[in-house]
Image (tube, helix red, strand yellow):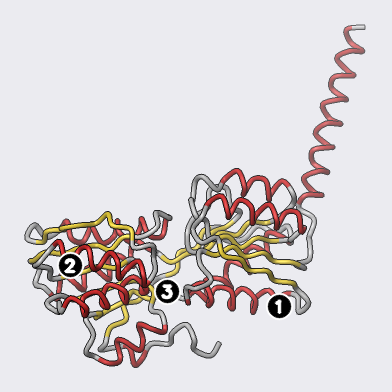
Amino acid sequence: MKKLGTAFAAALTVATALSASLAGMAGAEAKELKTLGISVGSLGNPFFVAIIKGAEAQAKEINPDVKVTAVSSDYDLNKQFTQIDNFIAAGVDMILLNAVDPVAIEPAVKKAQAAGIVVSAFDVSAKGADDTVMTNNIQAGELACQYIVDHIGGKGNVVIANGPQVSSVIDRVKGCEAVFAKHPDIKVLSSNQDAKGSRDGGFAVGQGLLTRFPDIQGVFAINDPTAIGFELAAKQLGRKEFIITAVDGAPDIEAVLKTGNSLIKASASQDPYLMAQRAVAIGNEILQGKKPAETTVLMEPKLITSENVGEYKGWTAAR
């Protein structure tokens, strides 16, 4: 009886392993990209408009009949959870995700994956996502703030107009602060004011900081809309003794830099169109049961200034 029990146990082990193997093969079975759901931070931000266009272009290249649905989380985590639930209920094949909170979003990511959906993160990380494509945001912050350091000769008062605490913003500020920290004669007067990543937020934070601090030489804004809003506040208050740098390389900043008479002097550019294309392409590889060469892609930013903006191929350039 003992020998029979041992043999039975061994057979059961083999059967279980075979079953798991077959299940794994079934899970890796190729699927066609028929539906794509996209959750972005804000549909009012040109960055996300370009993201959606890039994603649609890549998805339609894979399947001309693909259905694409894009929604705005408005940086509300609960709203994004609901959006992911809706995508799951709709049976989408892939979710392109701009996570409101890179860690707290994990249960929603896991829930989507359990439903057989590939989750492709872009611009910011999302814990548990199948792949991530984003700008090297630490480098972007370094580039933008090194420009300030060079312009003011490594000496003076600076402020950082911060934003929503997603990984991209955190990394930009981290890169910026690392550059400033190398220069003991640079004093960071403020770095924790959330301008919401928007023009209105930049205006409000700009008014507050400029009223509070009468002597500023440099301002780092975490994105272009924030920079534009901050400059509007400066104009209203008659302040023009400092320069502003940012991150994005958006169309509005292209126009501003080309004038040559703005407080905004530089922006570390991103390529949202290409970012979205890569995220969809890698996600589709995973959907096909293939293992991509890399699951985390960091795209290199370039500093756009009034001197080189004429050579810049921006977000709206022909693809």
Q: According to the image, label 2 marks what residue?
A: 210
Q: Earlier in the sequence, mark 3 or mark 2?
A: 2
Q: According to the image, label 3 marks what residue?
A: 270
Instruction: Kindly report the distance in space between the C-alpha atoms of the residues bearing marks 3 and 2.
Output: 28 Å
Q: According to the image, label 1 marks what residue?
A: 60
Is 139 displayed left or right of 109 in the figure? left
Q: How many marks?
A: 3
Residue that appears at 32% across and 81% down: 304
Quarter occupied by residue 193: bottom left
Is 306 in front, or is 76? 76
Residue that appears at 34% across and 93% down: 310
Q: Amino acid at mark 2?
A: Leu
Residue that appears at 31% across and 60% down: 162
Q: Nearer the viewer, mark 1 or mark 2?
A: 2
Q: Picture coordinates of residue 159 (x, y %)?
A: 20, 63
Q: Earlier in the sequence, mark 1 or mark 2?
A: 1
Quarter occupied by residue 261: bottom left
Quarter occupied by residue 69: bottom right
